[in-house]
Every structure is written in structure tokens, then in C-alpha cells.
Amino acid sequence: MRFGITLLTDLPWAEAAPRWRAAEEMGFDHAWTYDHLVWGGLPDAPWTTPTPVLGAASQVTSRIGLGTLVSSPNFRHPYLLFRDAQALEDLSAGRFLLGVGTGGNRDSEVLGAEALSVGERVDRFQEFVRLLVALRDGDHVTTTGRWFSLDDARTLPAQRRTPFLVAGNGPRSVRFAAEVGDGWITTGPSAETVDDWLDGLATASARFEDGIAAAGRENLPRYLLTDAAPLLSGTGRFALTSVALFEEIAGRAAELGFTDLITHWPRPDEPYAGSVDVLETVARDVLPRLRD
């Protein structure tokens, strides 16, 4: 299993840079940040978009993968996102990971966009991803869609093929990730209990496996974002509440076939309130053991 950590963009770079370096030094395989104009979890906090942050992170690291969790069509055109991905691919020397998902509604609301039904949002997202794939795989891209259009869009310089990791929890989105994604990202289903959450994850994982088989594909990575899970071991939802909790979640995720586990850098307050000491202990003592 591989392990990732998410760092929010609410800190000035002078404070954030040591954390990105530390994530690599601790041995994490990938590091992530959110892609929002405003994040509902910290609506009153300073916030920046991920492209400059990940570009800066690429210059203070050399090995760790760097990605978005997740980029969405709520405020991005796929061509602009593709161009950002090309820049980050180059800056990181091939380490950029593009996580994409339908996203929440807040960014669209800020821009005064028309409210969409859940079905319409999924339709738009699938068109968004298919266009990203067309841009990555071709040149002189012309298309007219319901949500996005392009007229002779150039794509030079050619990418090294940035992985497109498709987020999805529901049946339709999981099948779509299996069909077109280079990997699948999930938080798991909404659930009141651990058992229900794990049962939902098992069902979704089996659905993803069936989907990649139906598409004639195999061995796609599966990323589990742990910190949306319901209560585990009688503690809070944050995986780094304790070393034991993190190890328990990682073990259960591995049993379900997940290849990658992602948590958050601990913060002094909610959300993701926790101790950096726990993070350091997990990195030093638990990650090497779970990789063996």
C-alpha cells in the first residue's frame, strides 16, 4: 500500500513550504491539496488555488507525487485545467497527479452559476473528463458539447501522460472511473456506522472491479480518502486521531483491495484537529511496516 497526505491551502507559503518538504522526508508517496475558490470547511480562512501552490511544492521536493483532490467543472474549463496540468507536469518532472471529481456546489454558487441537479452535475463532469482525455491524447481538438466546446485547441507540448484519477462514490460514478480513469478515488458512502461504511466500500470496490473487467482493463490503483469515514474505534473521523486508529483504517482498506490511503496533515483546530506527533510516529513506525 502507498500513503498520501493532504495539505490545505490556508497557510502562507512561508509556513506551508516546510510541511511539503516534511511530507517527502517522512516517506509519504504522494501529497495533495484541494482545488477550490472557497472551501466550505474553512469559509473564513485565507485560501489559494492549487496550481501555484503545487508548482511551488514541486520546487521544494524531488520524489513525492503531487496532486489535486479534486479538480472539478464547478469553476474550471477542461482546456484551462489541461494547460495547468501541463505546466505542473513539467515543473514536477512527471510527478503530477490530476484528481478530478464533481466537487461541491460552493464554487459554482460564488460565481452565480445556475443550480444543477445531481444528474446534471454528473453529466457535466463526465463530459469534462472525456474532454480532458481527448486533450491529453490528441491535438487540434474540436468539439461541441452541452457544457464545454473547443475549436482547434492545440495541446503542444505533449504530456508525459499525467494520470487522471477519477473520484466517485455512487454506482454511476464508480463505473465511469473504471471506464476512463487511470485510477479511482473514493471517500466511501455516507454511513452511520463503521460496518455500514465498510460494507459500502466493499460494494463499491467490487463494482469498480467489475467495471474495469468490462472495459478490458486491469490493475488500476484505488485511492481511499480516510477522513470522511464514520466513527472508528470510538474516536473521531480523523485517521490521525491516534496511531492505532490510523493502523486500523489502513488494515481495513488493504483488506478491501485499496492500493493507496490518503489522510490530512493535522491542524490545531477542526477540521482535521490532531497532533503532529501522531503524524510523525505514523510516518516513522507504521508506514514502513504496512509496506512490508
Image: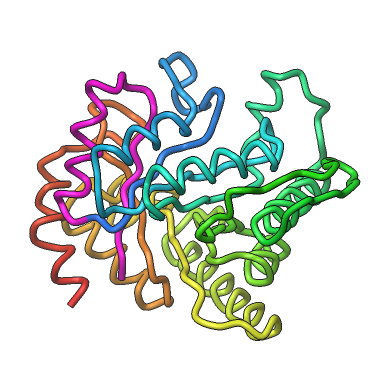
Answer left or right for 137 relative to 184. Answer: right
- Split into 4 quadrants, where in the image is the N terminus? bottom left
The residue under the point 46% across, 42% down is 88
Q: Nearer the viewer, residue 218 or 158?
A: 158
Point out residue 188 in the picture as x, y percentages from the top left corner: 52, 59
Q: Closer to the camera, 272 or 168?
A: 168
In this view, 292 is above or below 94 = below
Q: Position of residue 80 (x, y in %)?
A: 65, 36
Write the residue at 67% across / 18% down: 110
Q: Can you tell which quarter of the image residue 254 is in?
A: bottom left
> Does residue 206 appear to the left or right of 241 in the view shown?
right
Could you say which quadrant of the image residue 195 lies in? bottom left
Residue 23 belongs to magenta span: yes
Can residue 185 be seen here? no
Give coordinates of residue 266: x percent, y percent.
Answer: 25, 37
- Residue 274, image x and y in percent? 22, 37
From this viewpoint, is residue 232 visible? Answer: yes
Colouring style: rainbow
Who is closer to the viewer here, 194 or 20?
Answer: 20
Picture mark count: 0
Residue visible at 46% across and 33% down?
A: 50
Judge whether 231 appears above or below 291 on screen. above
Q: Which residues are magenta?
A: 1-27
Residue 33 relative to residue 216: left or right: left
Q: Is residue 292 above or below residue 237?
A: below
- Which quadrant of the figure contains the C terminus? bottom left
Q: Nearer the viewer, residue 11 or 86?
A: 86
Q: Is residue 201 magenta?
A: no
